[in-house]
Image (cartoon, rainbow, N blue to C red):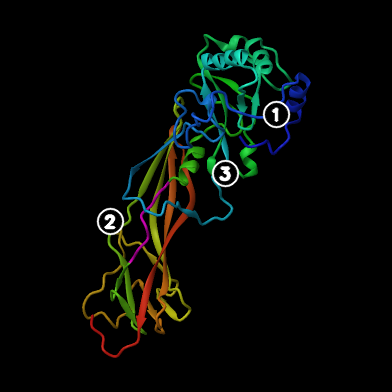
Amino acid sequence: MRPLKRALPVLTAAVFALGAWPTTAHAFGEDNDHQPPGPSGGASGNSLTAGATATSVTVEQVSGGKSGTSGKGLAPVDPNWKPPACWYEPVATSEQVKAATDQLKKTPNENLVPVTPSLSWGEQLMVDTFEKGKSPSAGIKAYKNFNLGKDGKFWRGVVNPDMEDDTEAYNCQEILFWQDAGALPKIANAPTPKILASYAYDKVKVPDTEVELKPEGRSTVNLPTWVWLDKGTFEDVRVRAELPGTDVWAETTAKPVSLHLEPGTADARTFPASGECKVNEDGSIGTPYTKGSSKEDPPCGIAYQRATGGKPFQLKASVTWEITWQGSGGAGGDLPNGTFDGTQDVEVQEIQAINR
């Protein structure tokens, strides 16, 4: 578990006063043979023993075409936007917190219980705070007998595994706390549909961007190369994120809206001049080449003005995806558009005879 990067003055004073500041921080139950679950799965019903980045949030694609093979996600067009760095989740029942504390009593020097994403406690703090109802410091709520018999769960912060190095990843440092069933915590970074939608943004996988070119194989100097994508190549992609144990969910939808062309050389003209080809009403982009159109300007294409000379140009084609979301409670809105690009080789020849 990564060290705490930001000071927690009140808590630190309480821990040192009780002599229980951990020199090493291990989640209870972890060893070499049992690693915490990954970021996209649950924690086998007891996330109390999981690592800081083990979330119970589930994300699945519910509609859209095949995902790309690159494994990369969308790149937000807004450089200042970023997904949530952390949030709170239910991680354990009263019985599970009691079991973890009882295990500490048996083996006090072997394991600690993580009470925040970056802090773990030993036996004395766990017994005082969750069994005896004695708070170790002002601002830390204590509980009698682990709240056994009450309907609810203990919650704790979770760090987005893609944002571990962000300073905001340490904004979810509330000590393990109780939340009654059927209600959400009224604190900053409590789970909301927008948080889930933003988390799902990075999980949206769109098709690889590879366009159709005409002529195939080689283009010709000063003659337009037609670029298009057939309808159905790019469909709206929708993913659903849910937080089990709550009624919070969100669906994030990516819709293709344009294709941007970068020829790979300054010695070229794009059609249109901006290089931005809009998506047609039927979902296609550009227009397929037809015989006899070799000297016409395509609605989407490139005219190279010099030959490649043995080294192909790298045509970069970027599809812009419009991102919207809707979620529980009628919530909804927009997220920054995202782009997904691909490159392909283009050979350009300079010849007299042209066969199309």
338 up-or-down from 132: above or below: below
Which labelled disc corresponds to residue 163? 3
Q: Give amino acid for label 3.
A: Met
Q: Which residue is mark 2?
A: 232
Q: Residue at 29%, 69% (x, y): give it.
A: 287
Q: Could you say whether the residue bearing mark 1 is in a helix, strand or loop?
A: loop
**Quadrant the C terminus occupies:** bottom left
Find residue 272 and report its image quarter: bottom left
Q: Give amino acid for label 2.
A: Gly
Camera-side mark, 1 or 3: 1
Determine whether, in the image, residue 213 is placed left or right of residue 121. Answer: left
**Quadrant the N terminus occupies:** top right
The x and y percentages for residue 261 are: 42, 69
User: Quick check: can you spot residue 218?
Assistant: yes
Secondary structure character of the magenta stretch overall:
loop
Q: Which residue is mark 1?
A: 23
Q: Could you say whether the residue bearing mark 3 is in a helix, strand or loop?
A: helix
Q: Compare residues 226 and 164 and report the one nearer the observer.
A: 164
Q: Is residue 189 magenta?
A: no
